């Protein structure tokens, strides 16, 4: 597969020879050369692994996520990612809490071999059998929603695994279509985005850009907070299992393809996102994952 990275390198080399021949850089070659500067931050992305030691069901090949993650981790090492974000549905259901904790420990062993900081977004399947505390303790993450800074950018992890009545998901107490960002988290988000002067990127499992079953029920209220902050460049989501991307206001809402869908390495999906200092984001998709490029 030819990546956009390869294409831009080729354009750069062609631009370089033009430069030598003509003695002046064309705008195209300058643009390509700017892309070749190291990014401010390089982030590995993957979602919807649904790992479980059980036979496939429909298009979901649960066991194969171990090998698919191993391939993504190898890529992240080659690319020297600074940060890796797992966008939820890391595990799938077992018939007991203990067995599911074993699934979680096993997939996390593979995933934890990534270079750089690791961040976990809660998906509905992460906290179907398990409680949030059990999941987070196993992957050694303190909170389900929080923010961090890296390379001049601000990153926010959201947790939409709450029912309409504000009760946190856990132990089969919810319907997957009833996903919400409670008022306390929304107020925290408003303040958190107001407190930074940096451009921001948001990660969340369920979708903020649709109002169907895959959407967070109060997505419009969350989008209003993002719009008012006016510093959110992109939102990355999982949950839908297919590629999708749309712009609402000034924010790109990018839904990543699921790793669990389909048998064989060719049906995996993961991405490497580079953020450049001219406020350009490039997402290089691997296997079934689409690639994107956005300028702000
Ligand atoms: Zn999923």
Image: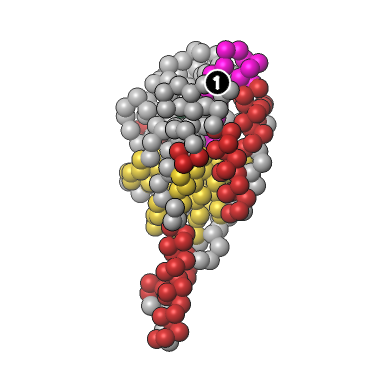
Residue name at image x 49 percent, y 43 percent: 270
Q: Where is 253 relative to 99, above or below?
A: below
Whether the residue carrying mark 1 lies under 8 Å from ligand 1 is answered with: no
Q: According to the image, label 1 marks what residue?
A: 54
Nearest the viewer among 128 and 53 is 53
Question: Where does the magenta region start and end?
Answer: 86-101
User: Taken as a whole, is the magenta stretch helix, strand or loop?
Assistant: loop
Q: Is residue 176 visible?
A: yes
Q: Where is 154 relative to 48, above or below?
A: below
Query: Which quadrant of the figure has residue 206?
Result: top left
Query: Which quadrant of the figure has residue 134?
Result: top right
Residue 296: % across, % down: 39, 56
Q: Residues within 10 Å of mark 1 (few under 14, many from 20)?
A: few
Nearest the viewer among 98 and 224 is 98
Residue name at image x 50 percent, y 59 percent: 276
Q: Is residue 88 magenta?
A: yes
Nearest the viewer among 122 and 92 is 92
Left or right: 217, with 113 as reference point? left
Q: Is residue 196 visible?
A: no
Residue name at image x 43 percent, y 20 percent: 176
Residue name at image x 59 percent, y 33 percent: 66
Q: Is residue 71 magenta?
A: no
């Amino acid at each position: 597969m030819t990546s956009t990275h390869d294409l831009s390198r080729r354009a750069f080399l062609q631009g370089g020879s033009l430069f030598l021949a003509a003695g002046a850089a064309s705008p195209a070659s300058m643009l390509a050369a700017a892309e070749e500067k190291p990014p401010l931050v390089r982030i590995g992305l993957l979602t919807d692994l649904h790992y479980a030691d059980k036979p496939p069901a429909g298009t979901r090949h649960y066991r194969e996520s171990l090998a698919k993650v191993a391939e993504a981790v190898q890529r992240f090492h080659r690319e020297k990612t600074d940060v890796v974000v797992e966008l939820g549905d890391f595990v799938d259901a077992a018939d007991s809490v203990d067995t599911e904790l074993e699934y979680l420990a096993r997939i996390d062993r593979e995933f934890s071999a990534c270079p750089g900081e690791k961040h976990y977004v809660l998906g509905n399947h992460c906290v179907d059998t398990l409680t949030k505390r059990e999941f987070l303790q196993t992957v050694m993450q303190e909170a389900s929603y929080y923010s961090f800074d890296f390379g001049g950018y601000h990153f926010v992890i959201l947790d939409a695994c709450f029912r309409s009545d504000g009760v946190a998901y856990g132990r089969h107490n919810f319907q997957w279509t009833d996903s919400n960002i409670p008022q306390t988290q929304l107020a925290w988000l408003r303040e958190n985005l107001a407190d930074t002067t940096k451009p921001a990127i948001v990660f969340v499992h369920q979708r903020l850009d649709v109002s169907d079953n895959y959407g967070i029920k109060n997505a419009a209220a969350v989008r209003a907070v993002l719009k008012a902050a006016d510093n959110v460049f992109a939102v990355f989501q999982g949950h839908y299992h297919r590629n999708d991307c749309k712009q609402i206001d000034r924010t790109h809402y990018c839904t990543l393809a699921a790793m669990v869908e389909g048998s064989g390495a060719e049906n995996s999906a993961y991405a490497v996102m580079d953020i450049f200092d001219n406020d350009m984001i490039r997402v290089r998709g691997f296997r079934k994952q689409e690639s994107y490029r956005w300028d702000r």
